[in-house]
Amino acid sequence: MNKIKILAFTHKATDINDIGKLHIDAKQLQVRLQYLKEKANLDELLYLSTCNRVEFIFSNNQTFNKSFLINFFSAFNPDWKEKEINWAIKNAQLFESEEALRHLFNVASSIDSLVVGEREIITQVRNAYEKCNEYNLTGDLIRLAIKSTVVAAKDVYTHTNIAHNSISVVSLAYRKLRELNVKQDARFLIIGSGATNTTMAKYLKKHKFSNFTIFNRTIENAKKLAEELNSQIYTLAELKNYKKGFDIIITCTGASKTIITPAIYKSLVGKDASRKVVIDLAIPNDLDPAILNNYDINLIAINNLQDIAKENLMAREQELIACNVIIEKNISEFKQVLKTRKVELAMSEVPKKIKEIRETANEVFAKELLNLNSESKEVLDKILSYMEKKYISVPMKMAKSILIEDIKKI
């Protein structure tokens, strides 16, 4: 377990607007993560990026010293200069060994989330693992850790009320929108068709809003959402030419740069001087902050949802004790999982070694074997095969027996 380490950037220690510096564009994800794994000398790597956190979960035998961190962040973004690297080192939360596992369990259980009790995070963790596994970045240790993480999170959600009447960043944003008494015929521009905007669209449709226009990087990926909302679709490249006006923009893309630039916003708004609403749940933000200086905009973004999130945490604090008990139980169980896995890996060599011994014995006693008739050879072969199977099964049973005794003592 000592090899498990985490570098985390979360809403608790870093300004949410700055977390976007750690975002990797989907098109560059595989190449950049493979480069990071190689240059930082990591055995395994898992990258988790959500609207309020970026986490690097990895395994290696190196220590968390300044030299390692400089090398790590230099590899993460080769364009970063000393200033950016120092910022990352200052803002990163460092976890290793058991503390890293506890942090990971807390993340997936939403205990460490901006919105405590939101269930989306467990899916985000699982999806992040599947993506990095697809890129051949992960191995046996992270596989076991994520498997146990999902089990721990499900235990928390099942046996506590932490997710009772659960809310999410999206639901908080929608609550803020409803507080503005938006007219039923309001014109919505939805930029991006990912999970966040799809969830937001369901809230809007449920409450009878119907005037939608969707912009997405590709038309194909937005078709399902467009059908559900009965809306038109345009490519993101066409946003700058849209002249039909709007009242509300809902944006959440995976872009590494701002999507709505001052020039594009000026074109979108035209001569309309009325106050607009922008819901920007992207990290980094899709709306260029300079726009706020020149236009009347009611901005709903991750960072201004934090006060509501704190109220949600206070309402759920009594459940945290029960959650922590479950987390600690799952940490103990993971330690046994690792012990079992070590035995399995060690025992996997036994059949190979026994076969080698048998082959050596055949060479050593080759002359004697020549003097045996076919029936004797057949009997001898059966005896050796029987002993071979027993020599494989007996150590496994003994090892499992020892592990069971260890579990009973915990």
Image (tube, helix red, strand yellow):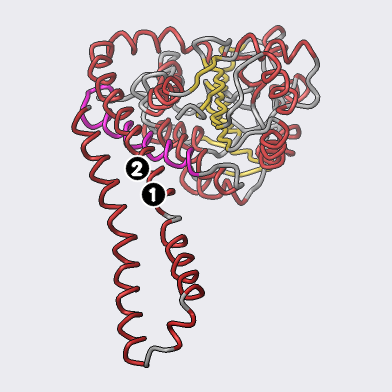
Residue 137, magenta (yes or no): no
Percent from the top left, x then y, of residue 365?
Answer: 46, 76
Determine the CA span between mark 2 and mark 1. Answer: 6 Å
- Callout 1: helix, strand or loop? helix
Viewer-closest of 267 and 250? 250
Viewer-closest of 25 and 84? 84
Percent from the top left, x then y, of residue 328?
Answer: 29, 23
Answer with the quarter of the image where residue 144 lies.
top left
Residue 146, magenta (yes or no): yes
Q: Are marks 2 and 1 in contact (CB under 8 Å)?
A: yes
Q: Find disc 2 in the rendering and name its residue.
A: 340
226 up-or-down from 300: above or below: below
Where is the N terminus found, in terms of image quarters?
Answer: top left
Q: Determine the main secondary structure of the stretch shown in magenta.
A: helix
Percent from the top left, x then y, of residue 284?
Answer: 64, 22
**379 sits left or right of 270 in the view:** left
Residue 19, numbered circle: none
Answer with the quarter of the image where residue 93 lies.
top right
Q: Residue at x 31, y 79 (%)?
A: 382
**339 sits left or right of 276 in the view:** left
Where is the C terminus found, in terms of image quarters?
Answer: top left
Three-letter amino acid code at the position of disc 2: Thr
Percent from the top left, x then y, of residue 262?
Answer: 75, 19
Q: Which residues are magenta?
A: 140-162
Q: Residue at x 39, y 49 (%)?
A: 344
Three-letter amino acid code at the position of disc 1: Glu
